[in-house]
Each structure stands twice: as C-alpha cells, then as structure tokens.
C-alpha cells in the first residue's frame, strides 16, 4: 500500500512535466530485493522491468548497478528506497542494453551520477536505424537516449570508486557480450557483478550486432576466473547469483562448441548442418524462455567463425 501511494505521487510529478507519460503499473510481487551479503542486495531479472539490479547501501545513500527499463524505474526506486537511507547517488552500467540502461534517466533526474565504460556513453548518444525486422526490444535499443541518461563519468580500461566504505573496481572486458561490458568488483564483500558476460547454466549471449565477440567473451570469462575465489558471488544480469564454477562451465561450453563448429566449417558444412548436429548437447546449458536458444548461440558462433575465414 505504501508503495502504491509512492508510485501515485511520482506519477503525478512526472505527468506535470510530460503529460504523455503512460501510467506506471504497480510493482509485481517479485520486484523485491534479496540480500546477497550484508549491505548488498539484488533485484532479480523480471520480464517486465529488465535485467538484475544490484544495490549497495551506505551512509551517504545508495549505489545501483543497472536500472532496468524506463517505465519501471519508479517501481525500482520504491523497492530500493526500503534498503537504506538517502538518495540513489550513483548508477553504474554493466553494458549498453536497454534492459540495463533505460532507467538511467529517471535516476539521473533525481540527482544520481551515471558511470560506465566510454562506449556506453557513446552508444547511448548515437541514434541508429533499427535493423530490418527488429522486434520491440531491438527497436527501443536502436534509438538514442536523452543526454542526462548517459554516463557522465566514463573510463576506458579500469577505474576505482569508493562508496559506502567499499572500494569498488570497475574493470572493462571489451567486445564480450557487447562492445563495452564491464565487471564491477566489490573486493571486501567478495562480490563481482558480471552483467551479461556470464549466463550461468544457459547459452552464452554474444551480441555480435552490438560489438560482442567470441574471443572477447572468453577473455571476459578468464578475467572473472582470475578475480573470483571459490566463495565469490557472481551476480549476472539475467537471473543468477553463482560462484566461479559457473564461469568455468560457461568457458568450457564456449570452447567445446567453438571447436566443434570450427571443425564442421572446415569440412564445408552449412549453418543448417551445424545447427542440426546438436553440438551443444551435454554441455550443461539450458534455453530459458526469452533467453538465448541453442540455435541462436550456434548461429552466432558459426557466423563469427565463418567471418574469420
Ligand atoms: Zn545485455
């Protein structure tokens, strides 16, 4: 009930500035934060609001990693406001996908500073034509964002950020899932937010259209494995909080599938033939609704290997 009142108030404030804004639906029962370690929570992915959101609470306010889709930002704000006092001071983006960055503008409008890799800012401020046959998500992804939604603190390879008594490290893992992925490491909490560089127990998401590559993905997983100890929590964008064995399994899957596909390409096999050969069977990946299917993964792998010649 308190949440509904808060949302109604926010909706009124928003509509005063932007009369065309659609009403914000109330948060679903599953838009709740769960504790990962003391002081750090995660809102798991939901189909409505987008990818997972990590929250660090400190005496000076809150820090978010990713913000979900735009229309759900008030609901996210209502959920995170229950985790600690003060405003959302920082938002860090794992990468430039609409289900991670589209809520940025809402939080920037409330005074948050947005932080991301150089390429995230560039991506958000560059309009592009949606690809032919784009679905709703891809079409939304293609548009440019308002300037205030883009990161104002950016970096190329690595940067530090101190917040809530924690020394965060932001580490670029370029051309992995997209052109501009980063890992966010909380060393004292033994937590790394890994974005979409790891899809634990699922097929990897190498988003070639957005600059992702197989080699970058492998390098990203290697970086995660180098940083993570046996008890480190790895928070992924799409539903899992796991340990390093999940990253090891994903790396094995990528290498095994790559080698199978490369061998078949060497024998002159077509994409249809490689897809029909079921080269991912037994590699421990499951296709979840709305996530990467075996066929999509093999297609991306095939196209990348084929493009290498
Ligand atoms: Zn993504």
Image (cartoon, rainbow, N blue to C red):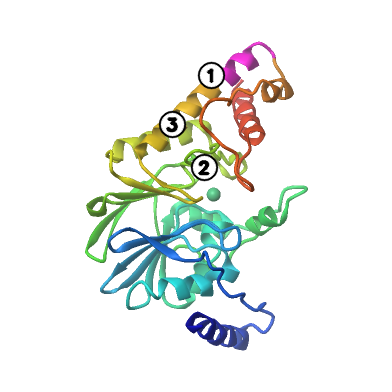
Q: Which numbered disc flags the more N-terminal residue, 3 or 1?
A: 3
- Nearer the observer, disc 2 or disc 1? 1
Looking at the picture, how far across and down is residue 67, in whole percent?
49, 64
Q: Quadrant of residue 80?
A: bottom left
Image height of 176 relative to 249, above or below: below
Looking at the picture, how far across and down is residue 176, in whole percent?
49, 39
Judging by the rendered image, the residue that carries numbered circle 2 is 177
8 left or right, relative to 116: right
- Nearer the observer, disc 3 or disc 1? 3
279 left or right, relative to 133: left
Dot 1: few (<14), some (14–19), or many (≥20) neighbours within 10 Å?
Answer: some
Dot 3: few (<14), some (14–19), or many (≥20) neighbours within 10 Å?
Answer: some
Mark 3 to mark 1 CA distance (whole Å):
15 Å
Query: Which residue is found at the position 35% from the left and 70% from the top?
Result: 62
Local secondary structure at mark 2: loop
What mark, if any, has residue 16 been given in the picture? none
Q: Is residue 139 visible?
A: yes
Local secondary structure at mark 3: helix
- Disc 2: residue Cβ within 8 A of ligand 1's nearest atom: yes
Q: Which numbered disc flags the more N-terminal residue, 2 or 1?
A: 2
Local secondary structure at mark 1: helix
Judging by the rendered image, the residue that carries numbered circle 3 is 249
Q: Is-magenta flag for residue 146?
A: no
What mark, if any, has residue 259 been given in the picture? 1
Stretch in magenta: 259-268
Decide whether the magenta segment is chiefly helix, strand or loop.
helix
Mark 2 to mark 1 CA distance (whole Å):
19 Å
């Amino acid at each position: 009930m308190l949440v509904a009142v808060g949302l109604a108030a926010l909706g009124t404030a928003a509509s005063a500035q932007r009369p065309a804004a659609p009403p914000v639906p109330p948060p679903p029962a599953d838009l709740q934060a769960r504790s990962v370690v003391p002081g750090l929570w995660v809102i798991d992915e939901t189909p409505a609001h987008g990818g997972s959101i990590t929250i660090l609470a400190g005496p000076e306010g809150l820090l978010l990693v990713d913000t979900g889709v735009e229309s759900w930002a008030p609901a996210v704000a209502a959920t995170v406001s229950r985790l600690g006092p003060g405003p959302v001071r920082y938002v860090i983006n794992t990468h430039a996908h609409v289900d991670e960055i589209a809520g940025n503008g809402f939080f920037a409008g409330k005074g948050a500073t947005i932080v991301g890799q150089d390429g995230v800012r560039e991506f958000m401020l560059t309009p592009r034509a949606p690809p032919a046959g784009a679905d709703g998500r891809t079409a939304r992804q293609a548009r440019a964002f308002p300037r205030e939604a883009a990161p104002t603190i950016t970096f190329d390879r690595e940067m530090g950020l101190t917040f809530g008594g924690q020394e965060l490290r932001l580490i670029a893992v370029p051309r992995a899932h997209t052109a501009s992925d980063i890992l966010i490491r909380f060393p004292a909490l033994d937590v790394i937010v890994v974005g979409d560089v790891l899809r634990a127990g699922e097929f990897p998401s190498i988003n070639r259209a957005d600059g992702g590559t197989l080699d970058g993905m492998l390098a990203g997983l290697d970086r995660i494995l180098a940083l993570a100890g046996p008890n480190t929590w790895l928070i992924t964008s799409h539903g899992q909080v796991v340990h390093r064995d999940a990253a090891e399994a994903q790396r094995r899957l990528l290498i095994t599938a790559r080698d199978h596909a490369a061998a078949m390409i060497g024998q002159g096999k077509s994409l249809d033939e490689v897809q029909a050969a079921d080269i991912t069977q037994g590699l421990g990946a499951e296709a979840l609704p709305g996530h990467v299917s075996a066929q999509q993964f093999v297609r991306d792998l095939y196209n990348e290997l084929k493009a290498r010649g």
